């Protein structure tokens, strides 16, 4: 297997910046965008739950409806691709959804029961997320951000720009997408969105804390 040179990866991280102005005439090739989506699919998640779905919003009318409820209004028009990442609302250890998680691992019988017991303890006691529907949804949403980061980083490695978006009216965006019959609101909710495309102007170099200020080695 061939691996990336460290300098190439670091250069991609320095190059990647939140892009708020795209070249509306330049589209990401289908093969490249499939690669970006595959990075999301292959991302890790807590207990292998994969509590996500990726809505690629290419419909112009739908984008127009979303614009009034999103901060980055111009990018809704010019981004090559817009992805709304959904998070599972009821990914409990004892749900039908978790049955699919277990099935993907090929676990049956006693092995399945042992795995479910581990997941039950994890959700009830270790991370304690079963107190409310919101805490369970927030846990699932945390997993989507792993996929989001991998998609943006992988995009930068091939010269594709991106911008993560939390600046939108969640209630209205969910409403619009549900009315478009894109998901069941009892099962899914919008966690985060992201635009992808090609910048049409220079972006100011990013500002970050010094490594020494944020890292502590405990030996």
Image (cartoon, rainbow, N blue to C red):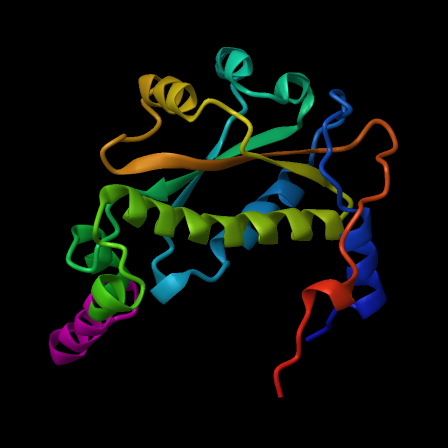
Q: Is residue 70 toward the left or the right of residue 53 in the image?
A: right
- Residue at x 29% of width, y 42% of height: 134
Magenta: main secondary structure equals helix
Residue 90 pos. (x, y %): 24, 46
Residue 65 pos. (x, y %): 49, 11
Above/below status of 153 relative to 185: below
Q: Quadrant of residue 191?
A: top left
Foreground of the two, 106 or 197: 197
Residue 135 pos. (x, y %): 30, 47
- Residue at x 59% of width, y 54% of height: 150
Above/below status of 73 relative to 213: above
Res. 141 in view: yes
- Residue at x 53% of width, y 17% of height: 63
Res. 60 in view: no
Residue 182 pos. (x, y %): 35, 27
Above/below status of 182 relative to 89: above
Q: Quick check: is 107 in the magenta stretch?
A: yes
Foreground of the two, 40 or 126: 126
Q: Which residues are magenta?
A: 103-120
Q: Is residue 161 toward the left or the right of residue 35 in the image?
A: right
Q: Quick check: is 205 in the magenta stretch?
A: no
What is the tally of numbered marks visible in this picture?
0
Q: Quadrant of residue 204?
A: top right
Q: Could you tell me which quadrant the C terminus lies in?
A: bottom right
Above/below status of 37 relative to 165: below
Q: Could you tell me which quadrant the N terminus lies in?
A: bottom right
Q: Is residue 121 toward the left or the right of residue 190 in the image?
A: left
- Residue at x 59% of width, y 51% of height: 149
């Amino acid at each position: 297997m061939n691996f990336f040179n460290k300098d190439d990866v670091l250069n991609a991280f320095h190059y990647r910046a939140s892009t708020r102005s795209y070249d509306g005439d330049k589209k990401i090739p289908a093969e490249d965008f499939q690669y970006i989506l595959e990075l999301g699919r292959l991302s890790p998640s807590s207990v292998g739950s994969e509590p996500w779905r990726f809505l690629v919003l290419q419909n112009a009318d739908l984008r127009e409806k979303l614009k009034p409820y999103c901060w980055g209004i111009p990018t809704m028009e010019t981004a090559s691709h817009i992805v709304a990442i959904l998070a599972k609302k009821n990914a409990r250890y004892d749900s039908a959804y978790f049955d699919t998680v277990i099935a993907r691992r090929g676990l049956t019988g006693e092995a399945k029961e042992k795995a479910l017991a581990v997941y039950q303890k994890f959700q009830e006691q270790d991370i304690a997320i079963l107190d409310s529907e919101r805490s369970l949804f927030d846990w699932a949403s945390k997993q989507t951000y792993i996929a989001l980061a991998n998609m943006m980083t992988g995009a930068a490695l091939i010269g594709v720009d991106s911008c993560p978006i939390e600046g939108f009216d969640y209630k209205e965006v969910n409403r619009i997408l549900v009315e478009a019959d894109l998901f069941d609101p009892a099962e899914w909710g919008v966690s985060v969105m992201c635009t992808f495309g090609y910048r049409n102007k220079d972006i100011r170099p990013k500002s970050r804390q010094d490594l020494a200020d944020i890292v502590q080695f405990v030996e």
